[in-house]
Image (cartoon, helix red, strand yellow):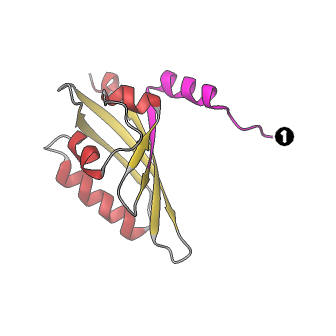
């Protein structure tokens, strides 16, 4: 059997079914892009790129220190990021996300990009 890549429509449907959004972060400048479902889950205004600050703004204030400490640890230790935390959407809605990240490194083992999957798991928390 020959593996076939998913087209964007199939990936978008998978994201909707799983209540999942994907984003990719460039660690050189901290900017990131999000899939349509990522933007929908967080209720973000549509933009071609977002800033690091716009991402940190989404993390619940009670969670920021823990999330950022774990984030730095994963970059330093070469582990992938698997963490659950609360976020606040721009409209004030609080959601619980399960975040899984794959860190891409260059030939010198320096982190350069992050592929991030965030799943809204609020329904599991109730």
Secondary structure under badge 1?
loop
Measuring from the top left, give residue 90's x and y in whole percent. Answer: 21, 30
Above or below, 65 against 54 in this view is below
Crowding at mark 1 (Cα within 10 Å: few <14, some 14-19, many 20+): few
Q: Report the residue at 43% width, 43% height from top.
A: 33
- The answer to whether residue 83 is above or below residue 112 is above
Q: Pick whichever, 2 or 43, lies toward us.
A: 43
Horizontal relation, residue 95 to residue 11: left or right: left
* Residue 4 vertical placement versus 24 (above, below): above
Q: Find residue 24 and report its horizontal and vertical position in percent.
A: 46, 48
Identify the residue at horizontal 38%, vertical 43% (top origin).
99
Q: What stretch of residues is rendered in magenta? A: 1-24
The image quadrant where one finds the N terminus is top right
Seen in the image, is 69 located left or right of residue 6? left
Q: Is residue 22 magenta?
A: yes
Residue 19, quarter of picture: top left
Extreme residue in the right direction: 1
Magenta segment includes 18: yes
Q: Is residue 73 left or right of residue 60?
A: right
Locate the C terminus and report the quarter of the image it occupies.
top left
Q: Residue furthest left?
A: 62
Total labels: the figure holds 1
In the picture, residue 93 is in which quadrant? top left
> Percent x, y for residue 71?
32, 58
Residue positioned 37% across, 52% down in the render:
31
Q: Determine which residue is flagged by label 1.
A: 2
| Residue 125 in the image, given as x and y percentages of width and height | 28, 27
């Amino acid at each position: 059997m020959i593996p076939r890549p998913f087209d964007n429509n199939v990936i978008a449907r998978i994201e909707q079914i799983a209540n999942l959004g994907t984003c990719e972060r460039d660690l050189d400048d901290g900017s990131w892009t999000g899939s349509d479902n990522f933007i929908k889950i967080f209720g973000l205004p549509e933009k071609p790129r977002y800033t690091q600050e716009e991402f940190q703004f989404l993390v619940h204030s009670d969670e920021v220190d823990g999330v950022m400490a774990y984030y730095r640890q994963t970059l330093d230790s070469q582990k992938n990021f698997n963490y659950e935390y609360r976020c606040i959407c721009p409209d004030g809605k609080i959601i619980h996300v399960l975040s899984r990240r794959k860190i891409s490194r260059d030939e010198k083992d320096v982190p350069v990009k992050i592929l991030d999957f965030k799943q809204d798991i609020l329904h599991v928390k109730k």
